[in-house]
């Protein structure tokens, strides 16, 4: 295992940034949900815009974190950790594209006057944006966590990270049940995985990388 000082710093800072941004996202999401009169309503502004911006900002930190995970992974797990990094990159590219288009195009006059706008840009099922975001988080994120998990072994801290990564991935996959039965409330199962559980994973990764001793400068 060849974990450099640069990789260690990247891991600590990206993990800390991920934790901070996830906390901000979780708080904003809770405030947005509590403001709704009905669970079926979509979250409105300003909380919706805040959530969109936080997701876009969060993605570079999460990709950098998986780069550090790949650098930290032992040789026997490098193939799996690289696969995890690729899936995290797919997640970042897809979800950033979706949320950037929603923030920009969906608010332009040329789009707002169209009757088909909700079918493309809204987060009310069914819509194109919603389907793509489900693919990003409930599939690509889940696969990223499940492929990264085997890289962590050898200590109690690493074992906890492995278990929680698996739990996060399984919960994210379970969120697909909302698509299967047409009930988006079931997607909240996935949200627990990629907001709640992964927050703990990122915090533990920050501790793991902070304690790690780099082999070279």
Image (tube, rainbow, N blue to C red):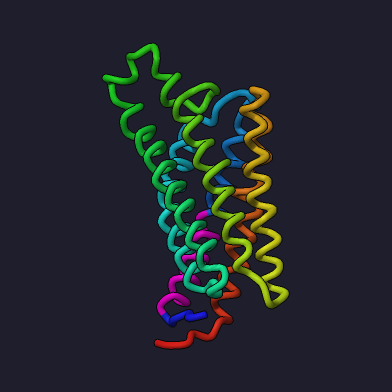
Residue 20 falls inside the magenta stretch: yes
User: Magenta segment range?
Assistant: 6-21
Q: Is residue 198 visible?
A: yes
Residue most extreme to the top: 115
Does residue 34 appear left or right of residue 51 in this picture?
right
Residue drawn where x is 60% and y is 49% of the image: 195
Does residue 51 appear left or right of residue 164 in this picture?
left
Residue most extreme to the bottom: 216
Residue drawn where x is 67% and y is 64% of the image: 162
Residue 116 falls inside the magenta stretch: no
Q: Position of residue 2 (x, y in %)?
A: 48, 81
Q: Nearer the viewer, residue 101 or 90?
A: 90
Q: Main secondary structure of the magenta part?
A: helix
Judge whether 184 appears above or below 206 on screen.
above
Q: Nearer the viewer, residue 16 or 127?
A: 127
Q: Position of residue 59 (x, y in %)?
A: 44, 52
Judge whether 111 appears above or below 54 on screen.
above
The C terminus, quarter of image: bottom left
């Amino acid at each position: 295992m060849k974990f450099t000082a640069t990789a260690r710093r990247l891991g600590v800072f990206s993990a800390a940034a991920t934790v901070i941004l996830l906390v901000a996202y979780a708080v904003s999401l809770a405030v947005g949900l509590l403001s709704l009169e009905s669970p079926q309503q979509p979250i409105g502004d300003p909380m919706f815009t805040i959530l969109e911006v936080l997701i876009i900002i969060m993605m570079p930190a999460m990709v950098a974190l998986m780069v550090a995970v790949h650098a930290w992974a032992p040789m026997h797990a490098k193939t799996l950790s690289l696969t995890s990094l690729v899936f995290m990159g797919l997640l970042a590219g897809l979800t950033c594209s979706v949320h950037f288009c929603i923030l920009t195009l969906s608010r332009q006059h040329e789009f707002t006057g169209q009757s088909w706008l909700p079918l493309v840009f809204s987060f009310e099922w069914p819509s194109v944006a919603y389907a793509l975001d489900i693919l990003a988080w409930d599939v690509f994120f889940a696969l990223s966590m499940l492929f990264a998990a085997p890289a962590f072994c050898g200590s109690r801290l690493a074992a906890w990270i492995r278990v929680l990564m698996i739990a996060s991935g399984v919960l994210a996959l379970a969120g697909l049940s909302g698509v299967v039965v047409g009930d988006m409330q079931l997607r909240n199962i996935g949200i627990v995985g990629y907001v709640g559980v992964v927050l703990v994973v990122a915090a533990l990764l920050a501790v793991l990388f902070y304690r790690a001793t780099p082999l070279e400068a």
